[in-house]
Amino acid sequence: NSQLPLAGKHALVTSGPTIEPIDSVRFIANHSSGKQGHAIAAALARQGATVTLVCGPVTIDPPLGVKLVSVDTAQQMYDACMAALPADIAVCAAAVADWRAQSPQDHKMKKQAADIMTLNLVKNPDILATLGHHQQRPDLLIGFAAETENLETNAQQKRKAKNCDWIVGNLVTTSSGADLSDDLVFGHDKNTIILVRDGTSEAWPQMPKTDIADKLVAAMITTLHQKSTL
Ligand code: C5P
C-alpha cells in the first residue's frame, strides 16, 4: 500500500540467536527467542516497509509479508545482511554469538580422559558495527544491548562504538545467579527497555514486545520525517 508511511523503504532486521558448531552434533547457542526482532519486522511491514528478516534458528513463525532469510551462524547472518544492502533502516535485534569454535570438528568429538578440556574460540564479525561504519550505512541504524548490569552506561558506549543511531537496552536477568528460565526477558512476551538516542535515555514501562515494536516503529517514522528522508 503506497499510502503507508514506510512505503518504498527497505528495512533489514536481524532476529533470534545464532548457533556456532563445535562438532557435528554440538553447538554454542543462547536463549534468544526471536520474539522482539520478529515483532519489529512485523511492525515495519505493517507500516509499508519492504522487510528482509535475517533470522537464526527459532521456533516461532515468521511474520507475514516479510522476506525471510534463515541462517545458523553469525558468519552466515553477516553474509546475508551484507547481501541485503542497501537498506534505509536496519534493526539488529539478533543475539549474535560473539565467538565461534576455531576448528569445528566434522565428527562427534570423543570424551577425553582429562577432567579439563579447552575449546579455542575466535571472534565473530560484528554485524551492527559493520553496518555502522559501512559505505552504505542505513539512514537509521538501531542496535540492542542486553545487559545484566550498568545498562545505561553500556548502552551509551555501545551506541558510540558501533556508530548506530539508537540502542534499545534491556536488562536480561533479575539478579546474579538467577535461573535463566525465570528471567524477565528471554522467551517472554513482555519486555522493559530503555531507548538511548544521542546521549539521552528514555525508560519505557514494561509492555508486550509487540507494543514495544509498534512504538519503536512510530519513533522511527518520526525520526525519518525529521531527517527529511520520508
Ligand atoms: O556487543 P554486543 O553483542 O552486546 O552488542 C549487541 C548489539 O550488537 C545487538 O544489536 C546485536 O544484534 C549486535 N551484534 C551484531 N553482531 C555481533 C554481535 C552483536 O550485530 N557479532
Image (tube, rainbow, N blue to C red):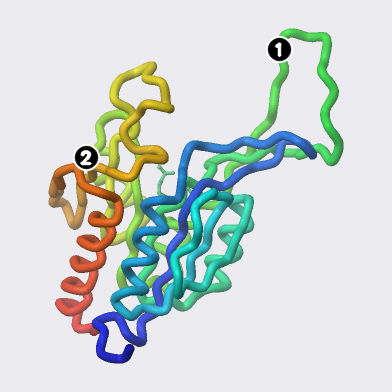
Q: Which mark is residue 152?
A: 2
Residue 156, position in %: x, y? Answer: 25, 46
Q: Residues within 10 Å of mark 2 (few under 14, many from 20)?
A: many
Residue 16, position in %: x, y? Answer: 49, 50
The amino acid beneath tag 1 is Ile
Q: Is residue 85 visible?
A: yes
Does residue 62 lie above or below 161 as drawn? Answer: below
Residue 126, position in %: x, y? Answer: 50, 52
Q: Quadrant of the N terminus?
A: bottom left
Does residue 227 lie above or below 55 as drawn? Answer: below
22 or 188: nearer the viewer: 188
Q: Which secondary structure, mark 2?
A: helix
Q: Which secondary structure, mark 1?
A: loop
Res. 219 image quadrant: bottom left
Q: Residue at x 20, y 61 (%)?
A: 215
Does residue 228 lie above or below 175 as drawn? Answer: below
Q: Residue at x 31, y 91 (%)?
A: 2
The amino acid beneath tag 2 is Glu
Does residue 29 lie above or below 178 as drawn? Answer: below
Residue 46, position in %: x, y? Answer: 32, 74
Q: Is residue 135 visible?
A: no
Earlier-in-chain disc, 1 versus 2: 1
Question: Going by the image, does 71 lie left or right of 176?
Answer: right
Is the residue marked 2 within 8 Å of ligand 1, measured from its CB? no
Q: Residues within 10 Å of mark 1 (few under 14, many from 20)?
A: few
Mark 1 vs mark 2, CA separation in Å: 37 Å
Residue behind mark 1: 116
163 or 203: nearer the viewer: 203
Q: Quadrant of the C terminus?
A: bottom left
Question: Contact (CB < 8 A) between labels 1 and 2?
Answer: no
